């Protein structure tokens, strides 16, 4: 920022581009510093926000700068993200099915709560399921669990039931005797886990059930892996969901993949171009699905 940069910017000719230093080097960037935002605003008249992955942050370069511009607008990528993600939850072609996975339920609670208000069916997978199993009184062996969230997991199941939303937990899981790709494995019903066995993927019966639910849904959101997909022996659940998403797209359903791990899994399966939309923002995707207003978007609508 400063007079030198402003002079360079004002003397740009058609076809020239001025690349600035990363704004994160400025202490005020993450605090939405007004002086930094104003300094950015003096460099141009038009602001195009196309960084969906940072749109959930109220920073100087993502939100504050907009009010210092003559005009501000969403870029093509941001526009596409909003149309798919907001459209999927606000005005979906029903039935709407959400597939939510990941290791910890604590990071997905706001998303699940929001989806219960909007979905017809929610399919749960990943390490988070064991917290729900414990809420049901099941033995979970050595599986991952968040004891402080068990009660809330039970409340989420009750909320879904009261609203008539089908919240479906895996009926069987792939167990391992240690957290290792080469561990001894077994398949067990959800209520038959014992000893030092830990669940690292959803089982084959679960995938049959999930396939049936996905088949009858017209809008499907996939956020979070079904197991430890980084280990080949425990990637079947996640890869199968990716394949089912691709099949659903082919028959005309709207399919959306959001979250870093989900995107990585779909691309790892070579199916990135077989779904309707892959979101470029992990945190931004989650907050949009939670129904939150994104500062980087709100700033544009006010500009």
Image (cartoon, helix red, strand yellow):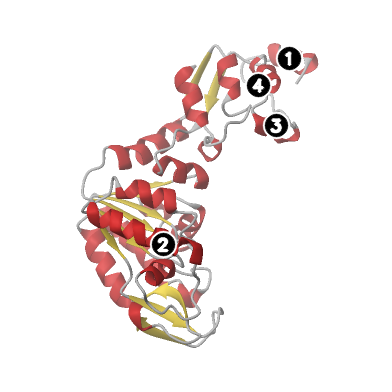
Relative to 219, residue 134 above or below: below
Mark nearest the camera among 1 and 2 is 2
* First in sequence: mark 2 vs mark 3: 3
Dot 4 lies on which element? helix
> Is tag 3's residue or tag 1's residue first in the polypeptide sequence?
1
Dot 4: within a 10 Å radius of its alpha carbon, few (fewer than 14), some, or many (20 or more) residues?
A: many
Neighbourhood count class around disc 3 (C-alpha, 10 Å): few under 14, some 14–19, many 20 upward: some
Q: Please report the residue visible at 32 percent of the width from the left and 42 percent of the height from the top.
A: 89
Front-lying residue, 28 or 3: 28
The residue tagged 4 is: 37
Residue wearing tag 3: 23
Measured as percent of width and height from the top left, residue 213 is found at 23, 61
Q: Name the residue tied to disc 1.
A: 6
Q: Residue at x 64, y 16 (%)?
A: 41
The spot of residue 13 in percent (x, y) is: 66, 14
Q: Nearer the viewer, mark 2 or mark 4?
A: 2
Compared with residue 35, is residue 92 higher up or lower down, i.e. above or below? Answer: below
Between 122 and 209, the one lying in front of the other is 122
Where is the N terminus found, in terms of image quarters? top right
Alpha carbons under labels 2 and 3: distance apart: 43 Å
- Asked if the residues shown at circle 1 and circle 2 are in contact, with their CB atoms under 8 angstroms apart, the answer is no
Q: Earlier in the sequence, mark 1 or mark 2?
A: 1
Residue that sits furthest to the right in the current view? 4
What's the distance in space between the residues labelled 3 and 4, CA to CA?
10 Å
Disc number placed over residue 151 in the picture, else none: 2
Disc nearest the viewer among 3 and 1:
3
Image disc number at residue 111: none
């Amino acid at each position: 920022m400063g007079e030198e940069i402003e002079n360079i910017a004002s003397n740009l000719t058609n076809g020239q581009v001025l690349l600035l230093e990363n704004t994160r080097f400025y202490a005020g960037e993450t605090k939405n510093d007004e002086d930094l935002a104003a300094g950015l605003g003096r460099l141009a008249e038009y602001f195009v926000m196309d960084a969906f992955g940072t749109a959930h942050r109220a920073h100087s370069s993502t939100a504050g700068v907009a009010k210092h511009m003559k005009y501000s607008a969403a870029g093509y990528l941001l526009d596409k993200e909003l149309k798919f993600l907001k459209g999927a939850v606000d005005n979906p072609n029903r039935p709407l099915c959400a597939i939510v996975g990941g290791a910890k339920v604590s990071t997905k609670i706001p998303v699940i709560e929001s989806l219960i208000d909007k979905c017809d069916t929610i399919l749960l997978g990943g390490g988070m399921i064991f917290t729900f199993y414990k809420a049901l009184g099941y033995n979970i062996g050595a599986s991952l669990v968040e004891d402080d969230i068990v009660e809330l997991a039970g409340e989420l199941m009750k909320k879904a039931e009261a609203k008539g939303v089908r919240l479906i937990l895996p009926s069987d899981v792939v167990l391992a005797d240690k957290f290792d790709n080469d561990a001894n494995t077994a398949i067990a019903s959800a209520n038959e886990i014992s000893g030092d066995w830990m669940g690292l993927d959803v089982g084959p019966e679960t995938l049959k059930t999930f396939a049936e639910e996905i088949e009858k849904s017209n809008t499907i959101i996939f956020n979070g892996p079904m197991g430890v997909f980084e280990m080949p022996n425990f990637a079947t659940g996640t890869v199968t969901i990716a394949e089912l998403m691709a099949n659903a797209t082919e028959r005309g359903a709207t399919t959306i993949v959001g979250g870093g791990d989900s995107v990585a899994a779909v691309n790892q399966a070579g199916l990135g171009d077989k779904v309707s939309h892959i979101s470029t923002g992990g945190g931004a995707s989650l907050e949009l699905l939670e129904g939150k207003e994104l500062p980087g978007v709100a700033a544009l609508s006010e500009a």
